[in-house]
Image (cartoon, grey):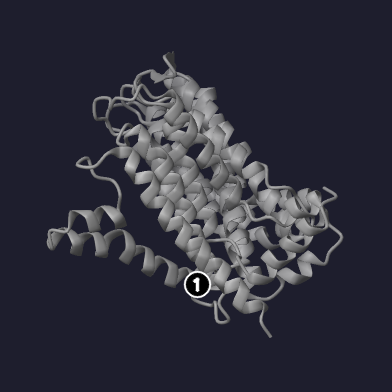
Amino acid sequence: MSNPEFRRNLWLSFSTHRLAAMPALLGLTFLAAALADPQDNVAGRLYTAAIMLFIFIVWLWGARNANAAIVDELRDKTWDQQRMSALDPWTMTWGKLFGSTSFNWYGGAMCLVVVATAGFAAGKPDVLANVISLCAVGVMLHAALIALNLHTSQFESRVIQRGGMGWLVIILVFMFMPAFSFGDQKPVHWWGMEIGHALFWLDTALLFAACAAFAAWRVVCNALQVRTRPWAWPAFACLLSVYLAGFAHENASLWLIGLFVSVAMTYAALFTEPNTLLRWRKLSLLRERDDLRGWLEHLPVWPTTLALSFAFALMVMLTSSGTQDEFSPVNMLHPQYAFTVALMLLRDACILLFFSFAPNAKRAVGATMLYLLVLNMLLPFLAEVAGLSAVRFFFLPFETTYESWSSVPVMAVHVAIALWLVRWRLRNDEQP
């Protein structure tokens, strides 16, 4: 118990009243659940009630406390004092991760005892796997919120002022609720293997809990000025691609799913990372000095998945048979369009840099989104209404009436214009 951050959070979370109130309220709730069962299935009723209470106390309430652990400090202007402390990143990370949610785990531990006892008494299958999965999902939610709030705080302060990224918990909770469905739990088919329902969700929860905890540690490292190289973001993109491809149709390509994942992750990082002119000037100076280590340490993470998207696009084209397979939710993209998608991503990144390098770049993200909406939706729609199919194809080169390969040079023209605009902005900035 030598972690001062953990001890501080314990003092803030516990009091004599709270220590006594949690077991008392849980005991009354379990008693009510047992007495309310009309079919004399007390163990099964307690098992279900304990799982629901754990989800509320640890997943939802605990996520709210983990969210507040960062948001409140940023709002109260005390985070800078934390950064100046002598704590190393990992000590700070697990101190906040488990200290801010310690009261929730106190109540959750009591629920887990009831889950295990009632589950074995009722003859429920995979009780131990469900207990571990419940804990792993809780850790994943808490760590993800700490990482996301710290990451967004360096760029968009309004997110913190509005309560941080707590809304994301609702999405993640609904994603993991099927793991604890109480109906017929069918095996999961993944990469041609048939895996037990509970075992698969246990492995999934442990995997993403480890990824979330690692992400929280990496973001705390950056906040404490401990430089890291941007290999973890593309590594997670590859891991997520392999995971999602396991559910895909047998004709779907791992490389195509990897392309979608890397594009989505690039956009997510692109619009949440600082892209200031000062940062890119520093990268230019480090490159001129041949300081590869320093260049990598200061490089944003979005260029890594941008490069990965081009690699996936190349693999899609190399491994495709040249014919369009039967339509499926995964295989919506003609193989020849893969490189066009990667080029479109590069174009959009250049547009954001163009606005970010402006003298008044406070609304760079908003301006970029507006122009992308006009470029990708409004102008193609107006061209289609006017019957100008060639003009529509120039703005959005994804039409079956034209050769799929012709979309690449069209998007290459977009990229060339966007790169020229960025260079023009830089050249104007250099002038006295």
Q: Give left or right: position of 11 versus 359.
A: right
Q: Amino acid at mark 1?
A: Ala
Q: Give left or right: position of 398 versus 118.
A: left
Q: In the image, is residue 2 above or below residue 152?
A: above
Q: How many marks?
A: 1
Quadrant of the rendered image containing residue 366: bottom left
Q: Position of residue 351 (x, y in %)?
A: 47, 64
Q: Which residue is mark 1?
A: 364
> Mark 1: which secondary structure?
helix
- Residue sitting at 26 percent across and 52 percent down? 393
- Residue sitting at 40 percent across and 38 percent down? 338
- Residue sitting at 18 percent across and 54 percent down? 389
Q: Position of residue 419 (x, y in %)?
A: 52, 61
Q: Position of residue 117 (x, y in %)?
A: 52, 26
Towards the viewer: 65 or 156: 156
Q: Position of residue 324 (x, y in %)?
A: 28, 27
Which quadrant, please, contains the C terminus?
Answer: bottom right
Q: Give left or right: position of 122 versus 294.
A: left
Towards the viewer: 396 or 22: 396
Towards the viewer: 162 or 40: 162
**Res. 414 visible in picture:** yes
Label 1 neighbourhood size at 10 Å, few (<14), some (14-19), many (20+)? many
Towards the viewer: 165 or 376: 376
Quadrant of the rendered image containing residue 192: top left
Quadrant of the rendered image containing residue 392: bottom left
Q: In the image, is residue 282 above or below residue 412?
A: below
**Res. 166 visible in picture:** no
- Residue sitting at 63 percent across and 60 percent down? 150
